[in-house]
Image: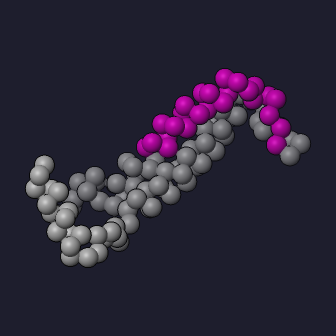
């Protein structure tokens, strides 16, 4: 029996990485190209694109890749399997912690 797509690792990756990156790239393209005319962009002495629509498309995919890299780095760093270190090492520290929890 197949799991729903949200329960699979690929589905989680798509929803937690690609979707926020997609939404942020829309915002970034809107902000970037509202301040800069695509015809004025020069990359290494060459025009980026002859038409504005091509520049918007290229810019969208560049921003999407950049935001995907950032989101995937966050995804992989937050999905670690190592437990956090136990800062209360001695038994008497643990006893004081239990007493503090009882008083709440």
Q: Residue at x 59, y 34 (%)?
A: 28
Main secondary structure type of the part rendered in magenta: helix
Residue 61, x across and y down, in percent: 60, 43
Q: Is residue 13 left or right of residue 22?
A: left
- Give the image's coloring scheme: one colour
Which residue is nearer to you in this view: 27 or 84? 84
Left or right side of 73 for 50: right
Q: Which residue is at a point 37% across and 48% down the rendered structure image?
A: 15
**Residue 68 in sight:** yes
Number of labelled discs? 0
The magenta region covers 19-43
Q: Is residue 81 visible?
A: no
Q: Nearer the viewer, residue 76 or 43?
A: 76
User: Where in the figure is residue 102, as x and y percent of width and height?
Assistant: 10, 56
Quadrant of the image occupied by residue 96: bottom left
Is 4 placed above or below 84 here? above
Please provide percent x and percent y for residue 99.
14, 60
Q: Residue at x 82, y 43 (%)?
A: 43
Residue occupying the far bottom of the picture = 90
5 or 80: nearer the eye?
80
Q: Quadrant of the N terminus?
A: bottom left
39 within the magenta span: yes
The picture quadrant where one finds residue 27 is: top right
Which residue is at a point 25% across and 57% down the rendered structure image?
7
Apparent side of residue 47 relative to residue 88 in the rendered image (left or right): right
| Residue furthest right in the image | 45
Q: Is residue 103 above or below residue 35?
A: below
**Residue 62 belongs to the span the image colors magenta:** no
Residue 24 percent across, percent down from the top left? 51, 37
């Amino acid at each position: 029996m197949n799991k729903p797509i949200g329960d699979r690792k690929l589905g989680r990756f798509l929803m937690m990485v690609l979707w926020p990156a997609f939404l942020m790239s829309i915002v970034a393209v809107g902000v970037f190209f509202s301040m800069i005319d695509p015809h004025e962009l020069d990359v290494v002495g060459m025009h980026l694109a002859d038409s504005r629509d091509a520049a918007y498309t290229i810019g969208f995919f560049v921003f999407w890749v950049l935001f995907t890299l950032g989101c995937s780095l966050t995804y992989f760093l937050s999905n670690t399997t190592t437990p956090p270190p136990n800062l209360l090492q001695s038994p008497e520290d643990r006893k004081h912690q239990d007493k503090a929890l009882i008083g709440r």
